[in-house]
Amino acid sequence: MNSTSSTLTQLASNLAANLYEFLKVVVLGVLIALLAALPWFLRTIAMLTWLFAAWFGLNAIQTIYAPFTEEIPLLALKGALILAQVSWLGLMILAVREHVWGGLALGAIVVGGLSWLAITVSENWQYADLFFRVLPSALFSVLLIYETIHLRSMRRGDGVKLSAPAFEWGGKIQSTKGE
């Protein structure tokens, strides 16, 4: 009887040791699998954050500008946000390819933060309606003035020379004044 209980005790201790080893291998395997999947998980989070920020920005534009803007200009504002988001992604891919996912997260933080700030300002500031009515056209006007001055200075040779011209007219244009 004593040998049977000692055999059973030894068998139970062997079973417990084997079960402990099995559980240790399973837990370590799951931990290693999670650590191996962590970069892909973080990339997925960065991409989802970027998409959520774009959605939040589009909703902010809809909330702020829809009451006094027609449909086509409203679509143009939304297109400008989409263009900015995609341009940021393209810049990240071209400039710092190894930090694309961090750049996506940073872009999401900036767009989401600016969208939240715009909604907060539009709800709490007395002159927000005037500000948001003037802002898109003022920014567009400043951009046109800057581009006009930049192109004129490039043509005159006063500005910074780029390696390639901003545009070409299909060949050399020759003046006919002296003929």
Image (cartoon, rainbow, N blue to C red):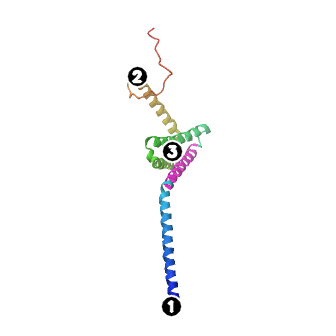
Q: Is residue 129 above or below residue 17?
A: above
- Please give the label number shown on residue 156: 2
Tags 3 and 1 in contact by the CB under 8 Å rule? no
Residue at image mark 1? 2
Residue at image position (56%, 41%) is: 78
From mark 3 to mark 1, how far is it between C-alphas? Answer: 90 Å
Image position, residue 30 (x, y; %): 50, 64
* Element at label 3: helix
Q: Residues within 10 Å of mark 3 (few under 14, many from 20)?
A: some
Along the viewing direction, whichever of 74 and 158 lies nearer the viewer:
158
- Helix, strand or loop under label 1: helix
> Which stretch appears magenta?
41-65
Numbered marks: total: 3
Q: Which residue occupies the extreme right position in the image?
A: 71
Please report whichever mark, 2 or 1, sits nearer to the chain's N-terminal start.
1
Q: Residue at x 54, y 42 (%)?
A: 82
Q: What residue is pinned by disc 3?
A: 128
Amino acid type, callout 3: Ala
Which residue is at the far top?
179
Looking at the rendered structure, the secondary structure element under dot 2 is helix
Please tell me which of labels 3 and 2 falls first in the chain.
Answer: 3
Residue at screen point 48% across, 63% down? 31
Kind of residue at disc 1: Asn
**Mark closer to the observer (3, 1):** 1
Q: Which mark is residue 95?
A: none
In the image, residue 4 lies at what x, y percent? Answer: 53, 88
Q: Position of residue 112 (x, y in %)?
A: 50, 49
